[in-house]
Amino acid sequence: MSTPFAAASATCSAPGCVSPAAAQWRRRPTAAELDAVVAAEQAQRQRIIELSGADGGTTAFGPLPTAETCTQAVYGCVQHLLGLDLAARIHASTCVPDPARLPGCACTPEPLPTTPVPQPPAPLPSGWVVTPPTAAPEPAQPASPAASP
């Protein structure tokens, strides 16, 4: 997940606001944004095929981006910020900062992902020993010169 802090050059996404962004959250892309993302991905893949000299059938790419697999950044200035709980979620494609609803928004954000329960580590095979880390050994002292008689 991205951080809630915006890039220094970003401006607020609220309609008509040109203030510098103070925070960022994510939303799903609109249909036009998704079309642009897919077109850019297809152009990049075509360029890779051309540069590699492959015929396209031997080059394996993952699936193209979908509305469920990509997001767009939304920026808010200090007057158009969402609450922290809402900023942590992914919002609908039409969600922009709305001064009438702040610190809320007009959409129903997606639920936060559930954190899987950590599993205990697998037992080590017999004969393997895990020793706890120890303190670094003391550096060896240089030998003192022998006393002359």
Image (cartoon, rainbow, N blue to C red):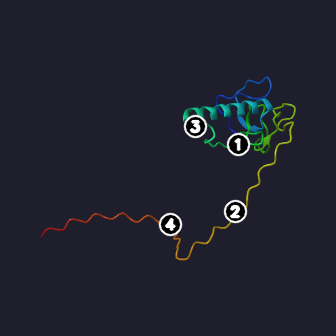
Image coordinates for residue 124, horizontal then vertical, percent: 58, 72
- Sequence-earlier tag: 3 or 4: 3
Q: CA distance from mark 3 to mark 4?
A: 51 Å
Amino acid type at circle 3 is: Ala
Image coordinates for residue 25, horizontal then vertical, percent: 74, 38
Amino acid type at circle 2 is: Pro
* Nearer mark to the viewer, of 3 and 1: 3
Relative height, residue 133 to residue 127 (above, below): above
Q: CA distance from mark 2 to mark 3?
A: 43 Å
Query: Is 106 placed left or right of 84 in the picture?
Result: right
Say few, some or many: other residues with alpha carbon within 10 Å of mark 3 (under 14 / 14 to 19 / 20 or more). few
- Which image quarter is the C terminus in? bottom left
Say few, some or many: other residues with alpha carbon within 10 Å of mark 2 (under 14 / 14 to 19 / 20 or more). few
Q: Secondary structure at mark 2?
A: loop
Which residue bears the numbered disc 3?
54
- Sequence-earlier tag: 2 or 1: 1
Amino acid type at circle 4 is: Pro
Query: Given contact means CB atoms under 8 Å apart, are the residues at marks 2 and 1 in contact?
Result: no
- Which image quarter is the N terminus in? top right
Q: Secondary structure at mark 3?
A: loop
Picture residue at 86% right of the left edge, 42% below the top: 108
Query: Given contact means CB atoms under 8 Å apart, are the residues at marks 2 and 3 in contact?
Result: no
Which residue bears the numbered disc 4?
133
Say few, some or many: other residues with alpha carbon within 10 Å of mark 1 (under 14 / 14 to 19 / 20 or more). few
Image coordinates for residue 71, horizontal then vertical, percent: 74, 38
* Nearer mark to the viewer, of 2 and 1: 1
Q: Which mark is on residue 63? A: 1
